[in-house]
């Protein structure tokens, strides 16, 4: 397939790469458990929007370049590919067909393959085999793609949202916030006395996140908003799984196992790295749902504004 670049494409790619670099440098990020001094940068929440706006390939390059020009270590260089994959997956999900002449390969198929390979990569590792339930967020995304298929691309292309009389739904918003707080309480140590509560934290987070997004946009009236949420979520969890695999791959290369044991496993009372991953499931759920909400809120406004200004010329 020939990739034709316009001046506008190059300009957008440069702007997004620079924006990623600024986010990485200015915002502190979220500490990565197990990697002293490393952080999850907030470009992870924005990167899928690159794929939505300029397509999967240019979005991938923009996110990758932004990460590489700010990388300060070999680990940073490797993890620069994580947000790039996020843009790739989100871009594919909103691309109906691949190829200049409407090829037979659907965009959702490529997104499904990428996420599926990442999940398979988890189970190939020794750590993944000892923590088989860890990819619950990622398997959920895989099922979401398999269920919606080209629906996401169709609704994204339509790009319609009813803004007449738009207002935040206060009651659902309050309910969503309460559910998120309850889900967080399920993750606390005192909940361990009730063995079932920690296992309920993840689905509770998901329910609270969905209700919160609904309260802000009214998903029942706007499939476009839901399409952006689906695409950004799947991109964000692809980023997450690739980051996990990179972390596993660099243990005793860039990250000494003794450091992980001394600063993370022992203080937390965990026996091994698979236990550390399982311990982090609720935290990962909070991060990824928060990133999805942020990406959806920013993405809806930005994409509608670009379309109104005739600046969103990506072929769908």
Image (cartoon, rainbow, N blue to C red):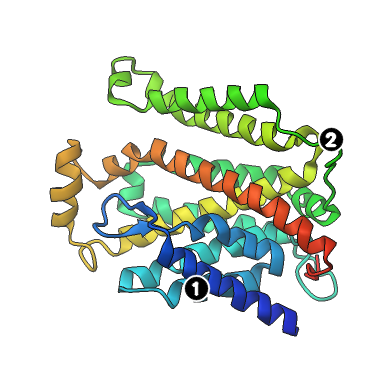
Query: Who's the residue at 80% across and 40% down the image?
Result: 222
Can you give x and y, in whole percent of width and height, for residue 19 in the image? Answer: 54, 69
Nearest the camera: 93 or 49? 49
Residue 165, label in figure: 2
Q: Quadrant of the C terminus?
A: bottom right
Query: Who's the residue at 28% across and 15% down the image?
Result: 193
Q: Can residue 148 be seen here? A: no
Query: Who's the residue at 25% across and 61% down the image?
Result: 251
Nearest the camera: 183 or 122? 183
196 relative position to 142: left or right:
left
Q: Quadrant of residue 108?
A: bottom right
- Residue that label 1 marks: 66
Examine the rendered structure and indicate whether residue 220 appears above or below residue 84.
above
Can you give x and y, in whole percent of width and height, for residue 225 in the image? Answer: 73, 45
Nearest the camera: 270 or 33? 33
Label 2: few (<14), some (14–19) or many (≥20) C-alpha neighbours in 10 Å: few
7 relative position to 14: left or right:
right
Can you give x and y, in whole percent of width and height, for residue 208 in the image? Answer: 56, 29
């Amino acid at each position: 397939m020939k990739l034709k670049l316009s001046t506008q494409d190059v300009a957008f790619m440069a702007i997004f790469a620079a924006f990623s670099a600024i986010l990485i440098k200015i915002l502190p990020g979220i500490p990565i458990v197990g990697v002293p001094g490393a952080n999850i940068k907030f470009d992870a929440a924005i990167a899928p929007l690159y794929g939505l706006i300029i397509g999967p390939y240019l979005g991938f390059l923009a996110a990758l370049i932004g990460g590489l020009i700010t990388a300060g270590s070999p680990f940073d260089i490797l993890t620069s590919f994580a947000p790039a994959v996020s843009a790739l997956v989100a871009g594919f999900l909103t691309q109906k067909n691949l190829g200049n002449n409407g090829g037979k390969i659907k965009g959702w198929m490529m997104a499904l393959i990428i996420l599926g390979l990442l999940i398979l990569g988890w189970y190939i590792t020794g750590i993944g085999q000892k923590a088989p339930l860890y990819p619950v967020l990622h398997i959920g995304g895989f099922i979401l793609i398999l269920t919606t298929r080209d629906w996401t691309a169709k609704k994204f292309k339509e790009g319609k949202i009813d803004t007449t009389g738009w207002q935040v739904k206060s009651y659902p918003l309050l309910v969503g916030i309460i559910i998120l707080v309850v889900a967080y309480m399920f993750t606390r140590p005192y909940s361990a006395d009730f063995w079932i509560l920690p296992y309920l934290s993840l689905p509770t987070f998901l329910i609270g996140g969905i209700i919160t997004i609904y309260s802000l946009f009214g998903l029942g009236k706007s499939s476009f908003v839901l399409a952006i949420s689906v695409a950004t979520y799947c991109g964000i969890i692809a980023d997450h799984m690739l980051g996990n695999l990179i972390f596993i791959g660099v243990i005793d290369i860039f990250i000494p196992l003794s450091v992980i044991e001394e600063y993370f496993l022992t203080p937390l009372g965990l026996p091994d790295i698979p236990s550390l991953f399982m311990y982090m499931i609720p935290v990962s759920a909070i991060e990824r749902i928060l990133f999805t909400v942020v990406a959806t809120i920013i993405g809806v406004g930005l994409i509608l504004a670009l379309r109104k200004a005739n600046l969103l010329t990506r072929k769908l």
